[in-house]
Amino acid sequence: MDAVEVRGLRKAYGDTVAVDGVDLSVAPGEVFALLGPNGAGKTTTIEILEGYRPRDAGTVSVLGEDPATAGADWRARVGMVLQTSGEFDALTVGEVVNHFAGFYPGSDDADAVIERVGLTDKRNARTHALSGGQKRRLDVALGIVGRPELLFLDEPTTGFDPQARLDFWQLIRDLAAAGTTILLTTHYLHEAEALADRVGVMRGGRVVAVAPPAELGGRATAAAVVSWQTPDGVSETVTDEPTALVRQLSERFGGEVPGLTVNRPTLEDVYLRMIGGQA
Ligand SMILES: Nc1ncnc2c1ncn2[C@@H]1O[C@H](COP(=O)(O)OP(=O)(O)OP(=O)(O)O)[C@@H](O)[C@H]1O
């Protein structure tokens, strides 16, 4: 049984159809990234899967239960990092994480979780005094302190500095290696490429493509652009057989080919083509 199974999901807000017939499956232990422009329906989809939002139509199974009716036992098996940060008044980081740990029967050690998200030196700081990126790290801590089987992360690394983002990626890899299923949304295509087993691209409330990041939109087999330096400037050739061309060039130059690059479409290239400039 898949960890997440969605068929024919629909949700409208008045006249706005936010989710328009989404089918989606996430396997146990998989890291799945949902991509798509602002307004594509990612948050609405995730919030329905989290049990935060009712749906208009479709079937949804999350860890074998319907989130619309699942109870406290189910909730304890699911971790969530919502798009907006929580507000915890004058409590300290340590107090908030300890408090949340108390909600879960098999929770992790609060200090260990604070360490994992890199907030140890802010343990006694009041949460309203944290920077934007530090608040987001606290959100991640609260999402994982219950040792969830399935973790939802809605734009988890917004506001992270580059080192914090790398640390977060390692945390996600560690969780995945320990068997946690992860469904995240992100606008950072490098993040999807670094983390996801598969990505799903949403546009206008629909999932328009699902594939491993390296294969999305035929990337793996797309023609390559080979370019190299000549005395007259840069020469460029589009080819299905870049290796053969590079071998010829190497013979012609007697070894190293000056300024050699071989490029296939990036995830960003195929993503932008797929969303075609609109939500
Ligand atoms: N509470 C709401 N009331 C009315 N319309 C809403 C509400 N929430 C979302 N929408 C609309 O539903 C559509 C999908 O929004 P959603 O937040 O799911 O998109 P998203 O893909 O998560 O976007 P983003 O990348 O900006 O987070 C948008 O047109 C949005 O304006």
Image (cartoon, helix red, strand yellow):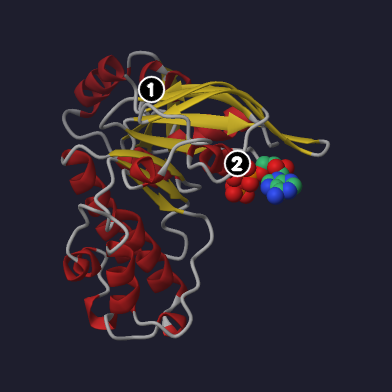
Name the residue carrying label 1.
Answer: 215
119 horizontally vs 193: left or right: left
Q: Residue visible at 25% across and 59% down?
A: 167
Residue closer to the observer: 84 or 190: 84
Report ligand 1 position as a quadrant: top right
Does residue 107 show up? yes
* Residue 186 position within the rendered picture, expressed as x and y whole percent measured from the top left: 47, 46
Q: Residue visible at 49% across and 67% down?
A: 86
Tell me the quarter of the image containing the N terminus.
top left
Tell me the quarter of the image containing the C terminus.
top right
Please say if 245 is above or below 173. above
Tell me the number on the disc at residue 55: none
Is the CB of mark 2 within 8 Å of ligand 1? Answer: yes
Quadrant assignment, res 211 = top left
Nearest to viewer (mark 1 / mark 2): 2
* Element carrying mark 2: helix
Q: Residue visible at 42% across and 41% down?
A: 71
Name the residue carrying label 2.
Answer: 44
32 horizontally vs 175: left or right: right
Disc 2 crowd, CA 10 A, few/some/many (<14, 14-19, 20+)? many
9 horizontally vs 222: left or right: right
